[in-house]
Amino acid sequence: MMEDLLQYAVPVLSVILAVAAGLVLSWALRKIILRVNRSRPELQATSRIARRPLQLVLCLAGVRIAVGATAASEPWHGAVDHVLLIALIGSFAWLTIAALLIVESIILGRHSAEAVDNRRARRLQTQLILARRIVVALVVVLAIGSAMLTFPAIQALGAGILASAGLISVVAGLAVQTSLVNVFAGMQLAFTDAIRVDDVVVVEEKWGRIEEITLTYVVVQVWDERRLILPSTYFTTTPFENWTRRQSEIMGTVELDLDWRAPIEDMRTELRRVLAGTDLWDHRAGVLQITDATAGVVRIRILVSAADSAALFDLRCLVREAMVLFLRDGYQQGLPHQRWEQAASDDGTPFQRTDPTSGSPLPPLPDSTSSSASRPASDPHDSALFTGSIEAVERSRAFSGPGNDAFEEREKNIASQG
């Protein structure tokens, strides 16, 4: 009886000691790493990510060693050791992923994305995120494959699969062709620097910012807080606008169609006053020019610059509003007008209509804007409808009633002579 108790007590005690040793070792390693890197506050905050997987890896490794040393001859040793091996593979994969997150946080902590010109930081952030996701996917696949290969039956199946790997690769490639295209397009976007996280772009005629870049799709946050989900291939096959490709500074225009009497110099003075009173302007460009003069108006273009696209949009709205109020309140003659002019002689009097045969003056033309009540009733025969024969005159009378007798007599004579 005592021998049976000792037979089970020794492995249990060894397992308890192994777990305790693993916890103590993980605590000591974490303290040593933090003390060595005490000048890096980002490591202090992210080291908690790896605490649990590190403890699990050390404890499982210690338990496996303890069980192998104290119960290698037991019939249950094989099954327990197999379970511990699979758990150790999974915990090691978890620890690797946590280490990748810590490395990513440390690198990004050295490059602040809050700076005005954060193009390098955003580029690095995009590449690190995509690289980390690729490595995480590989780690998960390798962990699953390693766990499956611990089963003898699957090892035999794996040998058969490797023998027909050529056919399987062709079938798999055809099955996931679209997904693979998007994956390679996502990798191309990350490492060719075509777009970066937080870039300002115009896609599908919508202005927005790159919010997230994955291996298969890109999330664009539109200005009204909607999200456009676009496949990665969109940005490798379709032209689009990137407003922050090289730098965050940007220029924009405000256009106004005004009358020819618009006070151009006074508008330039007002523009300088508005720009000097706002922090949205970065002092690089602020000019007012006439770019066109057609169709009865002159086109005024105001060119301004700002530190980024968001500030530029607000600055354009501010300048446009200031100019509209400036013209409305003080220079209404500069607003667009519609002109109608009547022809006149050299002395300024309207032209007099005369009869070309007798030279006698003719009455002025009736005003087209007068009401229909002031016009005389029109003769239905003036339109010369239903004429050319006696029957036509009769039809005209039937439709319009009795008309001018002289006109009817003339139409009958024309018809009889014809």
Image (cartoon, grey):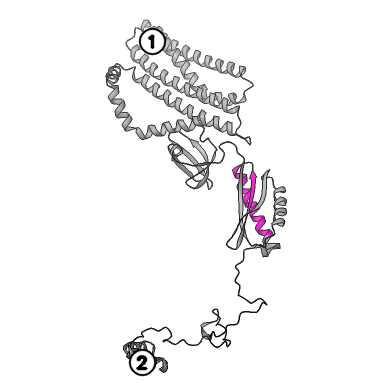
Question: Mark 1 belongs to which amino acid?
Answer: Tyr
Q: Return the residue at label 1.
A: 8
Q: Which residue is located at x 34 percent, y 18 percent?
A: 149
Tell me the element at label 1: helix
Q: Is residue 238 above or below residue 127?
A: below
* Classed neighbour count for the residue bearing mark 2: other residues with Cα under 10 Å, few (<14), some (14–19), many (≥20): few
Tell me the element at label 2: helix
Q: Which residue is located at x 54 percent, y 26 percent?
A: 104
Image position, residue 201 (x, y; %)? 52, 42
Which residue range is magenta in the image?
301-326
Say which mark, if any, is on residue 413.
2
Q: Is residue 391 above or below residue 198?
A: below
Q: Is residue 44 left or right of residue 150?
A: right
Quote the CA–CA distance across marks 1 and 2. Answer: 139 Å
Q: Which residue is located at x 64 percent, y 77 percent?
A: 345
Q: Is residue 295 above or below residue 356?
A: above
Say which mark, if any, is on residue 106.
none
Image position, residue 95 (x, y; %)? 48, 21
Question: Mark 2 belongs to which amino acid?
Answer: Asn
- Predominant secondary structure, magenta span: helix
